[in-house]
Image: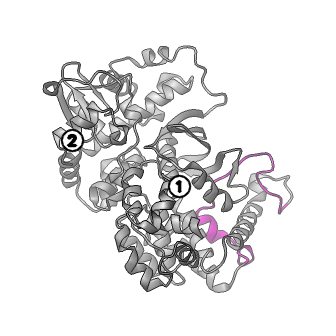
Amino acid sequence: MEMDFERCYRAVDSRDQRFDGWFYTGVTSTGIYCRPSCPAITPKRQNVRFFPSAAAAQGAGLRACRRCRPDAAPGSPLWDVRADVVGRAMRLIADGVVDRDGVPGLASRLGYTERHLHRMLSAEMGAGPLALARAQRAQTARILIETTDLAMAEIAFAAGFGSVRQFNDTLREVYASAPSDLRTARGRQQAPAGAGTIALRLAYRPPLHAQALLDFLAVRALPGVEEVRDGTYHRGLRLPHGTGQVALTPADGHVAATLRLADLRDLAPAVARCRRLLDLDADPAAIDATLAADPALATAVAAEPGIRVPRSVDAFELAVRAVIGQQISVTSARTTLTRLLTHHVDHEVDEVDGDRTPGQPHDQHGDLRGFLSAEDLLALPDSGFGMPVGRREALRGLARAVVDGSVDLAPGVDREEAVRRLLALPGIGPWTANYLAMRAFGDPDILLSSDLAVRRGAAALGLPDTQKALDGYAERWRPWRSYATIRLWRAA
């Protein structure tokens, strides 16, 4: 990652928070590293070095600033925009793949040798995959220390460390403090009530149009899985080691997140998925500047700055939603999905709620659960689908492809290859594959020009409303056509 010293130093001197997460400022005279917006006195030029990652700064022997907490900065928007190996690797590391499967597992998913992967990451990030994962573990450990009353040994293993000694050594190196000192610094602040409950702040680059996100999610909310209530989005999660629930409340400068996890090893992937869901690592200033250059969108951008692309916490869930939502309204798709989930819950009624009457909502006491898995869907009988045979078999074909690995829906998937494989499945067309590319795979440059609501939105703004003409016109919105799609939906 090439960084111009003068440009970076100007960002630090002006404390420009738009650059938080893009790079990290190392101060050699104090031995600390900061985010660009750190409120401390601007260091002298001769004492400054810039790093592309927190792991690179740690590798240079610097410790994290206690004032600005650089490890809590928004992630770099590059890893959502870029579809190359480094971008895919960063998304997988954030999802905890190295902690679960090690570097060999990460390299295998990406199709490269461990040595070559280390070389690519070191060249661009200043650190290899182990160091990058280690920096994430340190951040996870600090969150658990400051927000729970768990014993240090429990925190060490929940954060992904192999031993308590490794945990102690890493935190002393990264934060220049023993783990117990970090907890003492918490003061009298009480940990959230309930085992496995963690409260934290998810930073973002302003502006954030929170209401647009909540509106989008609310109209598609599935009973028993998710709900929007009093300005907070609640949903159940299916995570690598167990289940969880999250409540996300947008606030000024951050999103307040309260997580309840069955297994605390799922903290890092849960946070990564919540950030993806709300598109919190986006760079709205760059996106809005490009779209506002078009007079047809300028008024909408000025009225609603910071529109994000609502994404997903579960790519298989979104794939099922997309297949069911083909050529029907959002309301009809929600009804069909609710019926599917009700049949799924009834199918396991004896195992989950033996005294529950079949057909009753599972969330009658406020508990939310994650969406059904591919294996769950394949176990459903024909009567559980409530849809035409062709669509039912399309869902089963998708689920089989996910189970046997012929279709990969992981965060670090090769987007072009994933779309190609999806299109090869019966019942999945270009709209469905591109919808997944936009919301599940995070491609920022997808225009759903065949979508009826997109064309209605285009007509409402005085833009071409035929697919071919709109495709040609939208070339000026690159590389942010996904964000233009959301704005056209809102215009409709």
Q: CA distance from mark 2 to mark 1?
A: 30 Å
Q: Is residue 297 above or below residue 239?
A: below
Q: Residue at x 32, y 23 (%)?
A: 169
Q: Nearer the viewer, residue 188 or 156?
A: 188
The residue tagged 2 is 7
| Residue at 58% from the left image edge and 47% from the top image edge | 242
Looking at the image, how many numbered discs can be counted on the residues? 2
Mark 2: amino acid: Arg
Crowdedness of circle 2 by 10 Å Cα count: few (<14), some, many (20+)? few
Asked if residue 33 lies left or right of residue 171, the reply is left
Task: Residue 377: say if magenta.
Answer: yes
Residue 156 visible in the picture: no
Quick check: 113 above or below 398? above
Relative placement, left or right, of 64 versus 60 is: right
Type of residue at label 1? Ala
Q: What are the residue bounds of the magenta stretch?
A: 358-386
* Mark 1 crowd level (few <14, some 14–19, many ≥20, 10 Å Cα): few
Overall secondary structure of the magenta section? loop
Question: Residue sitting at 73 percent across and 58 percent down?
Answer: 223
Where's residue 201, x and y in %?
A: 52, 35
